[in-house]
Image: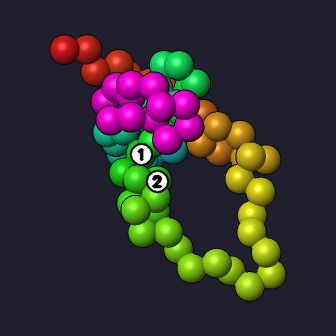
Amino acid sequence: MVCFKCNGWMFQERFSDPLSDAPDFQGWHCPVCGLIIDPLILFNRIHPPAPRPGGNRNLKSMGKMGFLRKKIALQG
Ligand SMILES: [Zn+2]
């Protein structure tokens, strides 16, 4: 998969959030710019939600992914 941000090659990896009970999930990581895409982000890219009345949220203020995620590399 090609990165939406820098057009670099993205690698499929497994991610987990050590701060929550959420299950691990499979996503894509760009080693060039650090972008992480999970299945929900990918779905929203393909099917963008309708714009909200009252303006859009500033997603950059949430930081990368909004919370800390521990990466478990899916080697091989
Ligand atoms: Zn990238």
Range covered by the magenta-colored residues: 1-13
Image: 60 above or below 30: below
Q: Position of residue 75 (x, y in %)?
A: 25, 14
Q: Give the amino acid at mark 1.
A: Asp
Which quarter of the figure is the N terminus placed in? top left
Q: Position of residue 57 (x, y in %)?
A: 75, 64
Are circles 2 and 1 on residues that touch, CB within 8 Å? yes
Within 8 Å: ligand 1 and the Cβ of disc 2? no
Name the residue carrying label 1: 38
Residue at image coords 36%, 51%: 39
Where residue 23 sits, quadrant-wise, is top left
Residue at image coords 40%, 53%: 42
Name the residue carrying label 2: 41
The residue closer to the viewer here, 18 or 48, is 48
For label 1, the SS is loop
Residue at image coords 35%, 19%: 73
The mark found on residue 46 in the picture is none
Image: 54 above or below 39: below
Camera sees residue 74: yes
Secondary structure of the magenta portion, mostly?
A: loop
For label 2, the SS is helix
Q: Left or right: where does residue 65 sit relative to residue 76?
A: right
Q: Give the amino acid at mark 2.
A: Ile
Q: Residue 64 magenta-drawn?
A: no
Image: 58 above or below 30: below
The residue closer to the viewer here, 68 or 9, is 9
